[in-house]
């Protein structure tokens, strides 16, 4: 049994090689109780849904004044935004899509209520839509 400079240690030792000098410090494994300042790793899992929510929300805002064609856009913007947030995607784009979807949905509902209560004349509203196109 070869001995190094430690005579009182009875553990068997492996022979030293030239590679031992390169990395003297042992690599420490990461444990679950280690603290890390970086936080959890980012996931791009819901990124596409967040961007789709944002795009649909942007498209739904000008369409809400023109016609009821806006309803699928605003509903999809809301749904895609919540799916993106649940999958851990970027929260900013998903939240913006959700907000714009709810705003356009609210505007369509208000216009519909105003037309049904005869506050806005339906014929004048149609003429206004035709002028905007």
Image: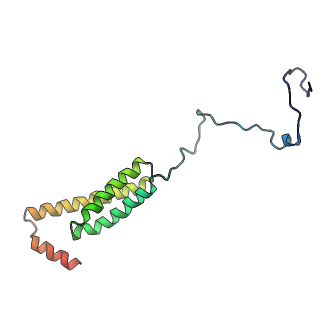
Residue at screen point 39% across, 55% down = 94
Does 16 sit above or below residue 107? above
Residue situated in front as seen by the camera: 50 or 121 = 50
- The C terminus: image quadrant: bottom left
**x, y (%) of residue 12?**
85, 25
Does 132 sit above or below residue 53? below
What number of labels is visible? Answer: 0
Residue at screen point 91% across, 24% down = 1
In the image, 122: left or right of 60? left
**x, y (%) of residue 95?**
37, 54
**x, y (%) of residue 55?**
37, 64
In the image, 101: left or right of 47? left
In the image, 8: left or right of 123? right
Residue at screen point 67% across, 36% down = 29
Image quadrant in which you'd find residue 7: top right
Residue at screen point 22% across, 71% down = 66
**x, y (%) of residue 25?**
78, 38
The extreme left residue here reads 118
Q: How is the image coloured?
A: rainbow
Residue situated in front as seen by the camera: 130 or 37 = 130
In the image, 44: left or right of 7? left
């Amino acid at each position: 049994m070869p001995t190094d400079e430690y005579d009182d240690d009875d553990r068997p030792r492996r022979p030293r090689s030239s590679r031992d000098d390169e990395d003297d410090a042992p690599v420490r494994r990461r444990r679950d109780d280690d603290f890390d300042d970086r936080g959890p790793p980012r996931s791009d899992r819901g990124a596409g849904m967040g961007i789709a929510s944002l795009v649909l929300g942007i498209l739904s805002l000008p369409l809400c004044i023109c016609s009821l064609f806006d309803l699928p856009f605003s509903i999809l913007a809301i749904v895609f935004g919540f799916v993106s947030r649940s999958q851990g995607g970027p929260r900013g784009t998903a939240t913006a899509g959700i907000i714009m979807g709810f705003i356009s949905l609210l505007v369509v509902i208000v216009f519909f209520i105003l037309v049904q209560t005869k506050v806005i004349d339906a014929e004048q509203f149609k003429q206004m839509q035709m002028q905007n196109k």
